[in-house]
Amino acid sequence: MGEIPRSEDRRSPIRRLGRFVEPIHTVAYYSPEIYGFNDDGFKGWWHAYFAYRSAPMGAVSAPTVTSVFYNFAPRMVSRAVPGCWDVMEPDAVLARYRELTTASMGRALGDYPEPADIAGAAAALRSFTADLPAGARPLYGAWAQQPWPSEDGGDATMDLWHGCTLLREFRFDAHNLALAAGSLDAVECHVMMTSGGHGNGATIQKIRGETDRLSLAAAEALDAGDLEALLGQLERVMDYLVATGTVSGTWPPPHVTVDA
């Protein structure tokens, strides 16, 4: 098994940025609204997941999704792709995903007590997140070409979500770069993850370092003061989502964890 250098300080700006955007990005994943895809003909959560997450890349094949997503078993991907494109074409999937996400984000943050946090974070994210280096980052590069929700009539809450999605996928691609550089294959990365305390073998089998350094461009896009302001806004939004039970704040979330 390859060796991955230890990542930066857990309190570093780039680590904090990664930790704060993840729960905001994943609000729709675990919301009741996302099951609206089942009404459209998708056969369960995973069938829709592979469709809406890969849709910005177009009607891609199962091998492409397996390669880009890196750590999913090929047979799991092939159960959803390319059949998902027979249910709904990628552009329609994206439109539906945005519709369901708008509903889930509106419900989750409709009573958020500091709307200036949402507007401020959305504006800051919009200033740089679509212009990060996209080389060797296929998922980020595809999402970066999508319009900002406010360009299509969306609000600041959805711009916040979109900016968090861009940063999340930028970092996700960096994870995979780091794993490949360390000669860790899809199975080995799960072994490393569970040995580090994230989930357990039973959970990972059921559902499927250096990353900080490779993601530094995101933290360096703003000056120190603006970055610290953004981090504060994102942390308050994240804390609210965790406190209200919208997201768990841990991964894997408790509802998918299986006893070892």
Image: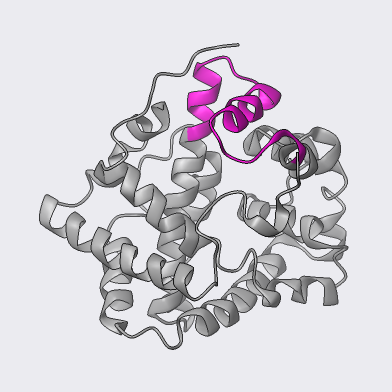
Q: Is residue 55 left or right of residue 235?
A: right
**Which region of the structure is painted magenta?**
175-202
* The image quarter in which residue 185 lies: top right
x, y percentage for residue 109? Answer: 45, 81
Q: Quadrant of residue 207?
A: top right
185 inside magenta stretch:
yes
The location of residue 220, given as percent across then percent down, is: 22, 43
Q: Position of residue 208 (x, y in %)?
A: 73, 40
User: What scheme was used to colour the molecule?
Assistant: one colour
Foreground pick, 257 / 22: 257
Quarter of the image for residue 42 reads bottom right
Q: Is residue 225 left or right of residue 42?
A: left
Q: Is residue 143 above or below residue 87?
A: above
Q: Quadrant of the N terminus?
A: top right
Q: How many marks?
A: 0
- Tell me: residue 119, above or below residue 65: below
Please give the name of the residue rendered at 65% of the width and 22% of the height, measured from the top-left corner: 188
